[in-house]
Image: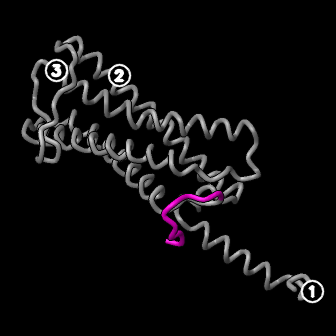
Amino acid sequence: MGCTMLRNDAQSYGVVTILFHWIIALIFIGQMLLGYLMVRTSDFALQFNLFQWHKSFGFMILALSGLRVLWRMANPRPRDPDGMGYLERLAAHVAHGLLYLALFLVPLTGWAIASSSPLQIPTYAFNLIVIPPLPLAISDQAEAFWTVSHAYLAYLSAFVATAHMLAALHHHFWKKDAVLLRMLGWYSTAHDRQHAEQLRSAPKDVQS
């Protein structure tokens, strides 16, 4: 990884922000797959285990997102590339805001499902601790409401995340700026190499 700084600066992300981004992104993708599998298996024991893992990783996303927001407050994000127009900047900021909201709302609505279900199945986070239920009404109607809310929020966040990824690829391959590179931790290395090549190719009187 080319980036060794812990904190963000005006040009690039620090390693802590990068780790938060990719760890949460990978867990989120895994959660979508788990959510798909656990409602389609007919094996009760397997389904129970998948539900417990799904809930466990949901709480992990919730915890990591809280830490990420605190880190974000102490580490302002790098400035946008100069080539981004107003509408493009606005769309990027709106997408980021929606994704941050989803990182809290999707796990919280999942927690609400477990809390409002008449079955009252305990949640064992990674088989280590029991997560207490939220103080919500317990009924079939409440469980159905939170289930629908959780599903729609998950699909919406998946859509926004896909648009976010496509935008990053557009910046990298079409606009050829550093939007993707700096979240991969390669911006500093690429920038330093480009600067060194420019110095080597510049006339000697310019370098001096």
| Mark 2 residue element | helix
Q: Nearer the viewer, mark 2 or mark 1?
A: 1
Along the viewing direction, whichever of 91 and 206 lies nearer the viewer: 206
User: Which corner quadrant of the image does residue 205 belong to?
Assistant: bottom right
Tell me which segment is drawn in magenta: 1-10
Residue placed farthest to the front in the image?
74
Disc 2: which residue: 149
Percent position of residue 16, x then y: 45, 59
Residue placed farthest to the right in the image?
205
Percent position of residue 181, x then y: 59, 62
Mark 3 / mark 2, whichever is N-terminal: 3
Disc 3: which residue: 117
The amino acid type of the residue labelled 2 equals: Ser
Disc 1: which residue: 205
Question: Which quadrant of the rendered structure holds the C terminus?
Answer: bottom right
Classify 65 as above or below 140.
below
Write the residue at 35% across / 47% down: 64
The amino acid type of the residue labelled 1 equals: Asp
Mark 3, Cα crowd under 10 Å, few <14 / some 14-19 / many 20+, is many
The amino acid type of the residue labelled 3 equals: Ser
Mark 3 / mark 1, whichever is N-terminal: 3
Classify 155 as above or below 84.
above
Write the residue at 25% across / 24% down: 112
- Whether residue 102 can be seen here: yes
Percent position of residue 95, x then y: 56, 37
Write the residue at 53% across / 65% down: 185
Q: Whole-Å distance between the Cαs marked 3 and 2?
A: 14 Å
Write the residue at 10% across / 24% down: 120
Mark 2 / mark 1, whichever is N-terminal: 2
Was residue 5 drawn as part of the magenta stretch in this picture?
yes
